[in-house]
Amino acid sequence: MENCIFCKIINNEIPSYKVYEDEEVYAFLDISQATPGHTLLIPKTHVTDIFSYDDVLAEKLFSRLPKIARALEAAFPEMEGLNIINNNKELAYQTVFHSHVHLIPRYTKEDDFSMHFGNHMGQQTENEMTEIAEKIAKQVK
Ligand code: AMP
Ligand code: ZN
């Protein structure tokens, strides 16, 4: 897609620090390394976000994650963990609108990276939880 920075990276129009490539996907270092080895995995087909994937494209991209994860683990034996993150839409911190997955190696609790799963809604009743689950379940197609 024209004017997409990640399409340009795939097409070698702008440089990147490539770590893996095959017919379907491209993986390269995030220019802003949250931790050493912070890698982005992208589909070669331009899709904006998770909502645009079909099953075939999803299989192509997400099936490559264990391969890259193991490569990071082997490359950085001091790695103690790995966060895998996919941001979708601006509110959820997406800034580049060619879908991508972050692989962020973790070394210590002091890494310049953190996540917080709040419990803002508090404890839901059984009925409320069932209602939420059913609302989603009937939309799964
Ligand atoms: P997100 O906020 O999830 O959309 O992540 C986009 C990521 O792309 C950010 O972490 C940026 O540092 C990274 N990024 C932007 N431009 C480049 C580039 N030219 N090469 C590598 N990473 C990039
Ligand atoms: Zn693109």
Image (cartoon, helix red, strand yellow):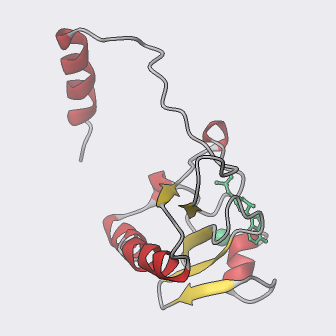
Q: In this view, does 71 lie above or below 61?
A: below
Q: Is residue 98 left or right of residue 131?
A: right
Image quarter for residue 39? bottom right
Image quarter for residue 28? bottom right
Q: In this view, does 18 lie to the left or right of 131?
A: right
Residue at 67 percent of width and 69 percent of height:
36
- Residue 129: percent from left, percent from top: 24, 18
- Residue 98: percent from left, percent from top: 63, 63
Q: In this view, does 92 lie above or below 125?
A: below
Q: Which image quarter has ligand 1?
A: bottom right
Q: In this view, does 94 lie above or below 96?
A: above
Asked whether the viewer can see residue 4, the reply is no
- Residue 6: percent from left, percent from top: 69, 72
Pick the residue in front: 13 or 75: 75
Q: Is residue 16 left or right of residue 44?
A: right
Pick the residue in front: 81 or 30: 81
Asked whether the viewer can see residue 120, the reply is yes
Image quarter for residue 12? bottom right
Q: In which quarter of the image is the N terminus?
A: bottom right
- Residue 73: percent from left, percent from top: 47, 75
How many numbered circles are shown?
0
Residue at 54 percent of width and 55 percent of height:
49
Residue at 18 percent of width and 10 percent of height:
127
Residue at 28 percent of width and 32 percent of height:
136
